[in-house]
Image (cartoon, grey):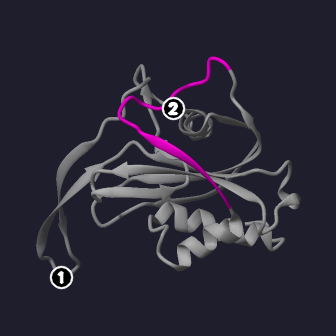
Amino acid sequence: MGVAALEFRRDEFVRPDGSRHSRLAVGHPGAVAILAVDVAKESDTTRLSDIILVRQFRAATGRPLLEVPAGTIDIVNGQREEASSAAARELEEETGLTASGWRHLRSFFTAPGFTDEWMELHLALGLHAAGEGRRMPDGDEDLEVVRLTIAEAAEGVRRGAIVDAKSLIAIGLAEALASGERP
């Protein structure tokens, strides 16, 4: 396992009017999130297709959240892990699944008011059990794998049961995929 180094800093900047300001910021190596849809190919996706989520306690919120699988891009021997490799690793660690088909969906800042974390959202298809010798979750992770249809997940968003930004984006894209769009 690599190390994900966070950097806490005070950024100084000058506004167009010449006034000087400073802000606290968190430098982040980047992260991945996975929209794992249990279908063989994109065109098979319907509102009744299952997506894979994880429920885990999030210390910053003080409660468990239902989210798409995700994690930080590792730094291994001074080298930044490729986002596609991190997505495959995180899917296996958090869900015990691997995927035969992958596609990058979107990239976005997670919370630009205080961090430069850049997240890469990937679509995973053709899901199957990782099998013996699979990668396991990090020692501090206590995860419950949850399967919901796209329709159930969308309803969870509407009623406020799913509330983190990456999952809102992923589920919105899953709905588009189920409608025949290529998000």
The quadrant of the picture occupied by the C terminus is bottom right
Q: Quadrant of residue 129?
A: top right
In this view, which residue lies farthest toward the bottom?
17
Q: Is residue 109 above or below residue 31?
A: below
Dot in front, 1 or 2: 2
C-alpha distance separating marks 1 and 2: 40 Å
* Residue at which label 1 appears: 17
Q: Main secondary structure of the magenta part?
A: loop
Residue at the spot 44% in from the left edge and 64% down from the top edge: 164
* Residue at which label 2 appears: 81
Q: Quadrant of residue 133?
A: top right
The quadrant of the picture occupied by the N terminus is top left
Stretch in magenta: 132-148
Residue 145 on the magenta span = yes
Residue 158 is left or right of residue 20, and the answer is right
| Mark 1, other Cα within 10 Å: few <14 / some 14–19 / many ≥20 | few
Q: Position of residue 144 (x, y in %)?
A: 51, 45
